[in-house]
Image (cartoon, coloured by chain):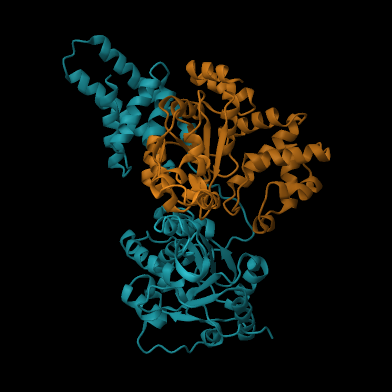
Chain colours: A orange, B cyan
Amino acid sequence: MDASKGLEFLKSLTVESLMKALEEKLYVADRELATALYLAIQMRKPLLIEGEPGCGKTEVAKVLAEILGTELIRLQCYEGLDASDAIYEWDYPRQLLYIKMLESRKDITELESEIFSERFLLKRPLLRAVLHPGPLPPVLLIDEIDRADEEFEGFLLEFLAEYQVTIPEIGTIKAKVEPITILTSNRTREIGDGLKRRCLYYYVTYPSKEKEMRILKLKVKGLSDSLAEQLVAFVNVLRQRPDIMKKPGISETLDWANALMKLGAKELNREVLRSTLVCIVKTQDDLARIDVDSFASFTNRQG
Amino acid sequence: MDPYRFVVEIAEHLRRHQLKVGVSESLDACQALNLVAGYGLPEIKTAIKVTMIKDPSKYHLLEEVMSQALERAASSEGEGEGEDEQGDTSSGSRLSQVSVSKDAQGRDQRSDRTVDVYMYSPMETLSRRNLRPIDPMKVRLGKRIVKRMRRRLAVLPGRRYRRSKAGELDFPRTMRAALGTAGELLELRKTKPILARLRVVAFFDISGSMDTYTDWIVRAMYLVKRLGRRVEVFVFSTRLLRVTELLETTNLEEIRRRLSERVDLWGSGTRIGSCLKQFLDRYGNLVDRTWTAIVVSDGWDTGEPELLRYTMEALRMRVGRIVWLNPHADKPNFKPMTIGMLTALPYVDVLAGTMVLEDMNSFLRFFGRAITPMKVRGKPVPKPF
């Protein structure tokens, strides 16, 4: 979609049109998620999506950028992430070289204003989002915010509330076009109230069996109905077991279905299960807890 | 119905249920309701949900508060002038719509919550325990100590830097200094990071001899999990169980529920050596010299002392520091007498009482008054035999 079509889409945006567009891009969203996205776009408020890993939180932002035909700016959060990696950093080596080049030619005030100008600024994702020329707003994905330190949330507050960043040497830069911002969190720690207050909030959970079947059929071409049913039933049993620590998400189900297609499996039997279980069970503990033989009878019954 | 009044009603209800709903949330809700004005009840509910309920464990309140707010608004409208019959009818129809949708939406509401389904397991034992609620006041006190402990045990660099001749060249500070001398680089500023972070692997003994400390253990698990971002928590008695993920929420009630339902080792015997061996075999790769091990146990051990010695040596080689918290060490004339404690002691860097997580004076007694990070033990790491 080019920029004009994207703008047109945004102008005539409805919950239905958004749902349809998401489905066209192979993202099955329920009406609630589509409404949350619709509100986030219309209200120009960041949307914080929390939920289990592998339930399509990051994918929403990617698909939305694709629908609008706009740039996706991604900030992947990690422990120790700070403003210099997220907002901006001065290009110090270049500044030093510049000072050396111009020394004795300029007075200090002139030099200072020059070296602390946009020219010597290394733009990180948040600043890139603010400086985006438009007219179509970029989609800014702040991924896995729970991995970042609590202090980093403080940096984000000004940005999320006003869509502006302050660089002491230059001043405050306000976004020309406010980005569509999506934050995701796996809930490994509680996000601060300040940040939550600035966002709309949506919690994604594991999909219903019917929805997961639809996702599988849409995303994995050639997957038979019976195999899809077996996969979904098996994954759902694992999700309900309290002793399984890392429960498989939708992405694991999709990986598993793709793996089975590559192996040419027609049904989920004991051998197939044993050899492909690693696609959905990702820890040694959980693998040890699953008795493949007892599940084999379950899958046969399903088949 | 007046949407503003409707939002205010809902906000009041939610606040009564300890949800933090401020004016900004109410304003957002009003704006969202205007945007979904042409849509049906599900969209109205979503608008309220995404703007006002930012805790998924409270989603079940949505139906309740919405129907109550609608009911209240409808009755107050009825009590009012009553001249607008159409308005009354529409409120009434919306109200009935909510009550119908409450039944129809029941399934959706349940799907928002985590549903634990119990199934047969050959590992099931009868030693689960219905734990008492965690006292939030004591947790609050403990959090102060956790902060202090984090600084004292830190071994990894944080984000803050201080000047140090032995550090690395700091471009920003060098530039700033150069500006003071007309851009002339007279001094190269060097800095090094302040140690502020730690990684912790904690082992909690939940065997029969520690029964009297169960409440404390649950609180301590919660607090220790908050010592850093990389914290692994295990419980042990005759076997080892990893509970890190059960603690990955800030909701005390949820932690109590998870530990009650999923930990099945309470009150059995103790085999510290064998449990540490299980850890080293299965999770040994998780830790290295940047990690601190915290063992919480009274040292009563029914396993082989030789195995305990071997595993303590191996653990000492893997991690940078071992802290042992023994509930009896709080007593003034405490002397380690149990075989387990005597065997483990040579490999322990800090032996302290369990009160260190409850009482600041006790913390200062065992960890000292300094706020700088403790030195990691300098003497050679014991060699395996």
Tell me the quarter of the image containing the C terminus of chain B.
bottom right
**What residue appears at the point 27 percent right and 41 percent down from the top-left corner?**
B16
**What residue appears at the point 52 percent right and 53 percent down from the top-left corner?**
A100
Q: Nearer the viewer, residue A151 or B40?
A: A151
Q: Nearer the viewer, residue A119 or B99?
A: A119
Percent position (x, y) of residue B307? Answer: 64, 82
Describe residue B234's horizontal placement relative to residue B46 as left or right: right
A2 shown above or below A208: above
Q: Nearer the viewer, residue B216 or A14?
A: A14
**What residue appears at the point 52 percent right and 19 percent down from the top-left corner?**
A7
Q: Nearer the viewer, residue A1 or B346?
A: A1
Percent position (x, y) of residue A83? Answer: 47, 49
Describe residue A14's horizontal placement relative to residue B5 as left or right: right
Describe residue B45's horizontal placement relative to residue B341 as left or right: left
Is residue A22 in view?
no
Instruction: Name, please, the residue furthest toward the front.
Output: A105
A225 shown above or below A159: above
Residue B51's image quarter? top left
A200 shown above or below B293: above
Q: How many marks?
A: 0
Is residue A9 in view?
yes
Tell me the quarter of the image containing the N terminus of chain B.
top left
Percent position (x, y) of residue A139? Answer: 53, 32
Instruction: Name, please, the residue furthest toward the right.
Output: A264
Percent position (x, y) of residue B214? Answer: 42, 68
Instruction: Name, please, the residue furthest toward the left.
Output: B81
